[in-house]
Image (tube, rainbow, N blue to C red):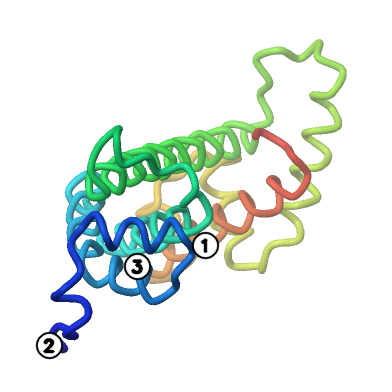
Amino acid sequence: MSPLHPVEESLGDEELARGVVAGDEECLALAYRRWSGLVHTVARRSLGDTQDAEDVTQQVFLGVWRGRAGYQADRGSFAGWLVGITRRKVADTLSARTRRRELLGAAGAALLLTDPEPDRPEAALERVLLRQELAGLPAPQQRVLRLAFYEDLTQTQIAERTGWPLGTVKSHARRGLHRLRDRLESHDLYT
């Protein structure tokens, strides 16, 4: 950890906030050194994941820089403003997690090719697109997903049938679902 710079020690929170609002990049760097730990801690405790907390910390300070004109000292402290931004970014991250889980669930359900609304005109197109995207996956991932969703096998049963270690089956399933999700998102399917 580097020692505090004399300028940083002499700047109070209000002065530092005014510098950031005025567009002083050095003040932004000082603000990051002063408050990034707070932001990261709030994000990590809320999200339970260090990597997500690091991403949120970067997003918060990028948001601070882009939205610096929106800070109003008479409405609260700069640190309080940062915590508010952090909470919004945490909420966004949690929403994105939920959307990813829902998409993976929808992809899994769609792989079963049972549509709860078979009369929807787009259902047939979705099934065709899903089959096409599944066929585009690497063979091991495709095999694991087909066995899981078409034959309703557990990962342990898939490992027994293929002769692959259980960890390998789990890796293929996870990677296959992630790739399938990315492919489906590119077509705006299930988003």
User: For this view, does 188 lie left or right of residue 53?
Assistant: right
Q: Residues within 10 Å of mark 2 (few under 14, many from 20)?
A: few
Identify the secondary structure beneath mark 3. helix
- In front of the other: 82 or 106: 82
From where the camera sits, is residue 6 visible? yes
**Residue 175, which numbered label?**
1
Asked if the residues shown at circle 1 and circle 3 are in contact, with their CB atoms under 8 angstroms apart, the answer is no
Return the residue nearer the eye: 110 or 45: 45
Percent position of residue 135, x then y: 75, 56
Which quadrant, please, contains the C terminus? top right
Whichever of callouts 1 and 2 sits on the residue coming sooner in the sequence is 2
Seen in the image, is 14 located left or right of residue 20?
A: left
- Label 2, on which residue? 3
Residue at x-position 47% and y-position 53%:
63
> Within the image, what quadrant is residue 27 found in?
bottom left
Give the residue pinned by disc 3. 167
Mark 1 and mark 2 residues within 8 Å of each other at the beta carbon: no
Earlier in the chain: of badge 1 and badge 3, it is 3
Front disc: 1 or 2: 2
Amino acid type of the residue that numbered disc 3 sits on in the rendered structure: Gly
- Under circle 1, the secondary element is helix
Residue 160 appears in the figure: no
Q: Residues within 10 Å of mark 1 (few under 14, many from 20)?
A: some
How much space separates mark 1 and mark 2, taking CA atoms? 44 Å
Could you tell me the amino acid type at mark 2?
A: Pro
User: Closer to the camera, 130 or 36?
Assistant: 36
- Residue depicted at 46% across the width and 52% down the height: 68
Q: Going from the N terminus, do you reach mark 3 or mark 2 first?
A: 2
Query: Is there a contact, CB below 8 Å, between mark 3 and mark 2?
Result: no
* Image quarter of the N terminus: bottom left
Q: Residue at x 43, y 63 (%)?
A: 169
